Amino acid sequence: MTSIRDIALYGYQRRWIADRSRFKIGMWSRQVGKTFSTTLEMADDMAGGVVEARPAKWLMLSRGERQSKENLRQLIAHIKGYDVAFRELEADVSFGDEVYKSYEVRIADDIWCLALPASPDTARGYSANVYLDEFAIHKDSREIWGALFPVTSAGFKLRITSTAKGKANKFHELMTSADGRWSRHTVTIHDAVRDGLPRDVDEMREGLADEDLWAQEYECQWLDEASAWLPYDLITAVEDEKAGRPELYQGGPCYLGNDIAARNDLWVTWVLEEVGDVLWTREVRILKRAKFAEHDAVMDELFGRYRVARLSMDQTGMGEKPVEDAKRRYGESRVEGVLFTPGNKLVLATAGKQAFEDRRIRIPAGDIRLRADLHKLKKILGPTGTPRFVADSDAGGHADRAWSCFLAVNGATDNVPSYAYDSAPPKSDPRFHERAPEDDEPAGLRRSFGRGAY
């Protein structure tokens, strides 16, 4: 049977696995193998359970169903190296009104690992060792912790790994607390390379082209959340694996936000579909240094794919002509130009943040550039006390994704035109002569304002 001594590991991985403390937490750089290392420790414990005839039960909680399945695949790859028989199981598990997909590898009745998406519900009801993967981005991390900790009370082990994601989460609290209960490990990209990981750090840093993102994701630095308009806990709370997938469009009314750029920043269009009282991101289209004809082609494609109720566009500066062109192509009533004055930006940002706080919006999960762009926006006070919004400009944009999102949210909540058809009255009816239809509004089309759809 294989043992860990037979597996080629870097020094930081070997130190992590060799640490058999009951409570162990690690803040790791991206792309250095934290899940590989932790699932290898779990596989070794489970294989050891077979040899020593002892229980080895594990509960693995990840950010979502896709990540749960992927992490279990990693664990199974390790188990295969130990040459022990196992079964793979998959099932739907209900917790109240929610249904989750569970993935399991079972060696014996008391030797198994169950992988589930993390939530306060899934964290309850098991007695097992626990692995929390990327804990800093779990929704409701404090509630999950409150539900989870009793699971380990009978002497079970607890493993937590994550990259840093701001300070407003339970991972930061556990990683920085002064108590001596936890064995803490920190592995930056520089630590990993010194231990032999083959990475070109300069090339990676240049390619990422975002110093804040580099400091957080690769150098394990806690970024200041004080001035961030959207803290990471708000951003990750509305992430969903079903968001950002155009094929899941349900045919409902859509609201588009378009932040315009031609040279240095990004041209971004954010598509929201209204499903019940939730705004689901269907896709985020991004162009850089593209010609205006390409902008128009993408917008035509989006209007052809979705039932667009409103397009809100940045009309500032070079946006004047794109807004004029869009009104001509799609109709005055469906296109709104927004000047990015300080007052308008405050209105947009406030409505956008409210959607995040109320969890009325869903955004794609696991997109680190999207998270960083949403988090990049900061509110500061000018010399006269007037609030201003600023964002550092880099290769990842100038908070362009954030503003396109806010524009889309604003279109969905502010004076949205709704349409319905009435039969036209006969010419003898005085109402027939009340008004003539607008150029882009056929006779018999009734227009009102407020929330609605075609």
Image (spheres, rainbow, N blue to C red):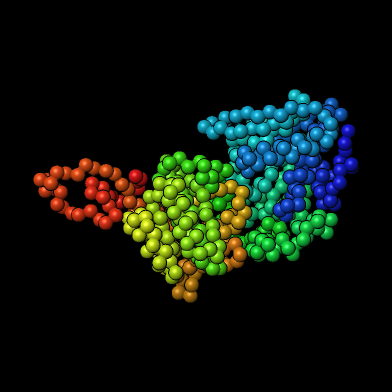
Residue 385 in percent (x, y) is at 46, 71
All told, the count of numbered labels is 0
Report the residue that reaches farthest toward the top.
109
> Is any atom of residue 200 visible in this view?
yes
Residue at left 19%, top 44%?
424
Residue 327 in percent (x, y) is at 36, 59
Q: 199 and 374: which one is in front? A: 199
> Is any atom of residue 258 visible in this view?
no
Residue 347 is left or right of residue 393, and the answer is left
Residue at left 75%, top 37%?
75
Residue 313 in percent (x, y) is at 42, 60
Q: 376 and 244: which one is in front? A: 244
Q: 90 and 438: which one is in front? A: 438
In the rendered image of this protein, does residue 103 appear above or below residue 327?
above
Residue 289 in percent (x, y) is at 55, 65
Residue at left 62%, top 45%?
138
In the rendered image of this protein, does residue 438 appear above or below residue 324?
above
Q: 423 and 128: which one is in front? A: 423
Task: Locate the C terminus by quadrant.
Answer: top left
Residue 60 is left or right of residue 411, and the answer is right
Residue 68 is left or right of residue 156, and the answer is left
Residue at left 23%, top 49%?
443
In the rendered image of this protein, does residue 240 appear above or below residue 322?
above
Task: Locate the N terminus by quadrant.
Answer: top right
